[in-house]
Image: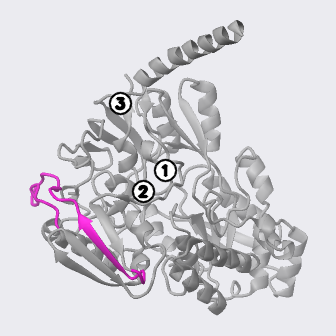
Amino acid sequence: MARRVALAALSLLLLLALAIPGAEAQTPKRGGVLRIAEREAPGLDPHLSISFLTHSYVSLAYSQLVRFPNGPEQKHPADFAILPDLAEKWTVSKDGKVYTFSLRKGIHFHNKPPVNGRELVADDVKYSLERFMAKSGFKERFEPVQAIDVVDKHTVRIALKEPFAPFLNHLANPSFCAILPREAEDKFKDFNHPDAVIGTGPFVLKSYDKGVRVVFERNPTYFMKGLPYLDGVVIEITPDSAARVSLLRAGKVELPHIWGWLSPDEAKSVQKTNPELSVVSHQVIGQGFIYMRTDQPPFNDIRVRRAISLAIDRKAWNDALLFGEGCVDAGPVPCALKDWKLDASKIDAAKAKYLVGYDPAESKKLLAEAGQKSLSTPLFHWPGYVVPWRSYYELAADNLGKVGITVELKPEEYGKYISTTALGKYERMAMGPSTPFTEVDDFLFGRFYPELPTNLSRVADAELTRMLVAQRREMEPKKRKQIVDDIQRYLADKAYYVYVPQWPQYVSHPPYVKGFKHHDGYGLGMRLVYTWFDK
C-alpha cells in the first residue's frame, strides 16, 4: 500500500515537473516578423481572381461576417464550425431563407487613405457582397441570394430565394466574401493596387515591391484584443520551389509556401538534412483531376471517358511519387472531407472501378468500341504547381499513350491559365488541382451544375442536376448526407472528371514558430493571428 502511494506521489511530481515548463513554453510572446517564401499572386482583388495566392495574400488584411475556427479554437484541420467575425451574432428564419446579421460596433478599417480608419458599417457589407455577386468567378455561391438590405447602421439582412445549406460556410470562407470599403474602389478602380488593400483584418499591407516582396504589419486597432502576436509578415517573392526550400533550410524564411507546405519529396529530404525543422504530415482537402470537354466529341462518349480513367495507374503514381501515403480514392468528394466522403469500397464494384481502377486492356477495348483507336488531344496545364504536378502531367501523357491516346502537353503562363483554362475556357482536355473548398457543395454543385465556370468538364446531366439542387436545399444534415452519398454513387462510373491520387502536405517551419496550425481552405490571416515566436 505504502509503495503504491509512494509511486503515485512520484508520478504526480513527474507530471507537475513536466507540466510547468510546458505551460511556460506555451505562453505566447509578442513580436517578430514571419517570413514566407512564395510565388507572386496574379492580383490582389479577391473578386477578380480565383487564385489561391491572391486570396491567401489578402486574407491577412480582410475580415468576413463570419469565419472558421483557427489556432487553439479548431478541433482539427477540417473544422468548419461557424464563428462570429465582423458579425457578433445572427439569426435565421424558420423557413431558412432570411439571415439577419448584427455587426460589432466600433470596428474600424485600416488607417490608410482614402478610408482613413473610418468605422465599418452595414453599407460596407451590402456593397462588398453585391460586388462579389457581380464580379467573382465564384459568384454562383450566392446564386440563391435574392436581396441584401441594410436594416440600420449595424444590421444587415440577407434574403434567399430558397433554403441554402452551404450559405454560412460560403460567408466564412476566406476571403471570397471579404468586406471591403467602397472608397478604395472609387479611387483605384478595383482592389488590385496595393494601396487599395484596406480592410479590418489582423494585418495592414504596408508595401509591395513587385517581384521582390510584400510587407504586412500588425493592425494596431484589430478588434480581437491582444492579437495578432506577430509584429508583421513578409512574403519574399520566390517563383522556384527548390529556392523556397533552400530559404527554409538556410533559416531565411519561416514558411516555404503560403501555407507552410512541402511536397512529400521535399519533406523527406528536409527531414534528413534539417532534422531540427518541424515537418508534420496532413491529409488535405484537395483534388487533382483530368477534365474534358464532355459537351463535344469524343469526350461526350462515356466509353472514351471511362477508357481514360481506366488508363491511369493510380496505385503506381501513389507508390512512385507519394511514398504510398496519398489517397487513391480522390473524388468526387476529397479524401480529407471525411464528413461527406463516401469511400469507393462502399460503392458497387462494377461502377467504382471507373473511379479508382486500372485496366489498360479494358481501356483499349472501350476506345475501339467508340471508334477512337488513335485519339490525339492537347492537355492544357500550368507547370508551376508544386511537386508532384510536373510528374503528374508527364505520367498522364505516358499512361494515356499506352492505350493509344496521344497527348500533347500544353503548358500555359499562370495568368492565362487561371483566367481561361481554370474557368473552363480550353479546348478538349486539361489537367490541374482543385481549389481546396470547404463545402461539399463546391465539389458537387460547383463542378457539375450546367453553365457554371467551375463546371470545367461542361457536364449537363438532368438526373444529376436534380440531385445537386436537392442536396443544397436540404437543411437537415443527416438527410443532406444521404443525398450527397447518392450523388457519389451516381457519379462513380460517369468519369466526367478523372481523379488522380491526392498527396498529403507536410507543414514545415522552424521549431520556434508556435501556434501555426494547418486549417483547410484559403485562409492565412487567421492562422497567423495565433502564430508566435518562442525566441
Q: Is residue 520 above or below residue 20?
A: below
Specify whether residue 359 is painted magenta: no
Q: In this view, does 317 lie above or below 352?
A: above
**Residue indicated by mark 2:** 68
Residue that protrudes farthest toward the bottom in the picture: 462
Q: In which quarter of the image is residue 500?
A: bottom right
Q: Residue at x 54, y 55 (%)?
A: 78
Q: Please say if 302 is above or below 267.
A: below
The residue singled out by tag 3 in the image is 28
Q: Which mark is residue 519?
A: 1
**Residue 535 spot, x, y in % from top left:** 37, 22
> What residue is drawn where x is 40% and y is 21%?
24
Q: Which amino acid does label 2 sit on?
A: Phe
Q: CB under 8 Å between callouts 1 and 2?
A: yes
Task: Check disc 3 and give the amino acid type.
Answer: Pro
Q: Which residues are drawn in magenta?
A: 94-121
Q: Is residue 496 visible?
A: no
* Amino acid, disc 1: His
Secondary structure of the residue carrying numbered label 3: loop
Q: Residues within 10 Å of mark 2 (few under 14, many from 20)?
A: many
Horizontal arrangement in the rendering, residue 517 relative to residue 315 (left or right)? left
Task: Name the chief secondary structure element in magenta.
Answer: loop
Please provide percent x and percent y for residue 123.
17, 73
| Residue 99 belongs to magenta span | yes
